Image (spheres, rainbow, N blue to C red):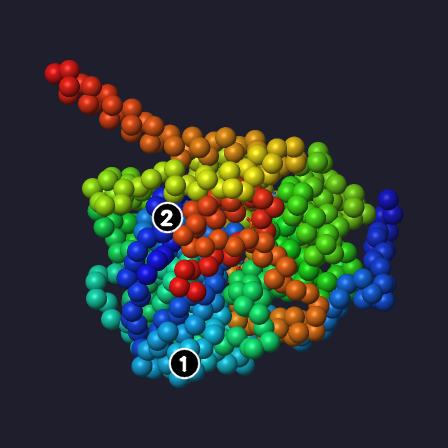
Amino acid sequence: MPYTADAPVTPPTRDELRARVPGWGADLDPADRPAFPRERRDLDSGAHWVLPEQQPELAPRERSLEHERLTPVFGTAQPVKGASGLLKKLAYARFSEGKAAHWLLLVASDRVDAIESHLASFGSLRPDQPVTQTGVRGELTHHGWRSRVGRGRVDVKHTWIDPILVAGPWVLAGALAVAATRKAVSR
Amino acid sequence: MKAMEYRGPYKVRVTEKDIPRIEHPNDAIIRVTMAAICGSDLHLYHGLMPDTRVGSTFGHEFIGIVEEVGSSVQNLHPGQRVMVPFNIYCGSCFFCARGLYSNCHNVNPNATAVGGIYGYSHTCGGYDGGQSEFVRVPFADVGPGVIPDDISDEDALLMTDALSTGYFGAQLADIEEGDTVVVFGAGPVGLFAARSAWFMGAGRVIVVDHLDYRLQRARDFALAETVHFGEVDDVVLRLKRLTGGLGADRVIEAVGAEADGSLLQHIAGVKLKLQGGSPVALNWAIDVARKGGTVSVLGAYGPVQSAVKFGDAMNKGLTLRMNQAPVKRQWPRLMEHIRAGHFRPSELLTHRFPLEHIAEGYHVFSSKLDDIIKPVIIPAAA
Ligand SMILES: NC(=O)c1ccc[n+]([C@@H]2O[C@H](COP(=O)([O-])OP(=O)(O)OC[C@H]3O[C@@H](n4cnc5c(N)ncnc54)[C@H](O)[C@@H]3O)[C@@H](O)[C@H]2O)c1
Ligand SMILES: [Zn+2]
Ligand SMILES: [Zn+2]
């Protein structure tokens, strides 16, 4: 091992590289690299305003404590609702993005949202269907076994956890429901 | 209209939603003709991104036809074929004025730490995305671009994210002529980054993954050397040996929060969500870079802390560069590369799923079945 000033591995020559790789070196000059320099003031973004007009806030919109105003444009999909909504509102109103509590509350609210939404779906015309929604049919149509086995994939070591994570809560809820019904019937 | 709908971790379905409306004078409504699923969508799908609400429609890679425009839109007209960068951005704030289009301050009320992204949780602004028949596109005069006649739908679709991101990542790495470049991850983003590293003058490109069929693409498509990390004991040591003991001049991390390679980290970060993902690939990147070298991070992580080996990065004097890609800046030059015949990006589109079969599409891409590289979603109306 040559611990000298020379690079230990000599790269192929320009001609060799050009012959082997179409377009080799086309962007050698940083001036040809569109992301260089990273910050520049001479780009035309297409904006024809100094400050964009404000999108109307038709329903109260939660926002990060770090924003002193509602941004001129914002998404209106899935407004907060239910118990998860209360958690989300608390996370936004109380903790800035620098606080772990902000993110951990949001993560927790997502789990509550999933439970609430599943329960609500059972009162709707389209209850959640764990089997079709997980797309496991793809295992049959897209060679689940052949894609995984004997190919040196390292993720097979934890693939077994997924069905437990996904189906576990349903099995548990089912078992509880059965137990509760039994109890009610035996009374 | 029909749209993909998130129902909780690992569960999605197709549902009926209202066609989006113009909500701001510079909005446009786009009828989607083609969308894709990105590795980033898998982080949402697996429940790793805080404030991903049930009912969300994902999808930040899409092309389509302009259906309707708001009153202040000057540059777009109904009927035009457009590609839409995954970034939502105003074009005029402090950050946009400096070309940091992925870091806009005017489009995401939920967080200042990230810009706006279509269909990418409320943490990225609460916008529904393009795995759908129609989508609301804010700042129609800024983001979308009309697709030139000589650019195919497939190449245009890839330009909305994966291709632009890979190309951007190679630029972030500050490659100089003759450099050895190691790329972690042979997904679409990593493969495009590896292929682009040659444009910048790389002398060697080495791609690391554990999926044999993706490493095959790294050799055929990206013309790179490969290392299968499942087949070596110590991937960092192997890469050091391959680089004469000093490490790689430049390293590109195109894996992100769901990295494999450490069972413990994967279970803690990805399955149990105890940190902002599993930073295995990022730590390998730090270990493999030579002293004074550059690590370009494209992989996405959650906003919660992760266990990154910062001491090594400091002691080695590394330059760490990273961002969500400012997509539209990449387009003119990328189109020149495509027109010059340097490569055919669409070779990486391996699968097509009708929107009706989106659940299957997510499962197959997430589980990496059937030698999938990149899936395309076709809405019924397209
Ligand atoms: N910065 C941006 O603007 C931007 C844009 C798009 C995607 N991304 C991110 O880039 C990453 C890759 O996206 P993609 O679409 O190619 O995803 P992908 O899921 O198709 O590819 C990820 C690849 O990484 C491999 N991998 C897993 N662990 C590894 C490890 N320890 N070392 C090496 N390889 C490993 C996987 O086998 C897989 O092939 C994601 O995190 C995505 O969120 C960032
Ligand atoms: Zn993406
Ligand atoms: Zn902006």
Q: Amino acid at mark 2?
A: Arg
Residue B241 coordinates in the image, percent (x, y): 79, 43
The quadrant the N terminus of chain B occupies is bottom left
Kindly state the secondary structure of the residue where label 2 is placed: strand
Question: Which chain's residue wears label 1?
Answer: B
Q: Secondary structure at mark 1?
A: loop
In the current view of this chain or complex, which residue is farthest to the top? A186
Residue A133 in view of the camera: yes
Closer-to-camera residue (A64/B46): B46
Q: Residue at x 50, y 30 (%)?
A: A160
Q: Is mark 1 within 8 Å of ligand 3?
A: no
Left or right placement of residue B375 versus residue B126 in this view: right
Residue B113 appears in the picture as rendered: no
Where's the C terminus of chain B, which quadrant? bottom left
Q: Which mark is residue B13?
A: 2
Across and down, in percent, residue B17 comes to 30, 58
Q: Looking at the image, is mark 2 or mark 1 earlier in the sequence?
A: 2
Amino acid beneath label 1:
His
Determine the image quadrant of residue B280. top right
Say which residue label 1 marks: B77
Question: Residue B122, relative to residue B9: is it above or below?
Answer: below
Quarter of the rendering containing residue A150: top right
User: Residue B379: percent from the left, percent from the top?
Assistant: 42, 60
Q: Residues within 10 Å of mark 1 (few under 14, many from 20)?
A: some
Q: Is residue B296 left or right of residue B1?
A: right
- Tell me which residue sits at (58%, 57%) in the image: B349
Q: Is residue B178 above or below residue A153?
A: below
Asked whether, in this view, residue B196 is left or right of residue B370, the answer is right
For residue A125, above or below residue B167: above
For this view, does B55 lie left or right of residue A186?
right
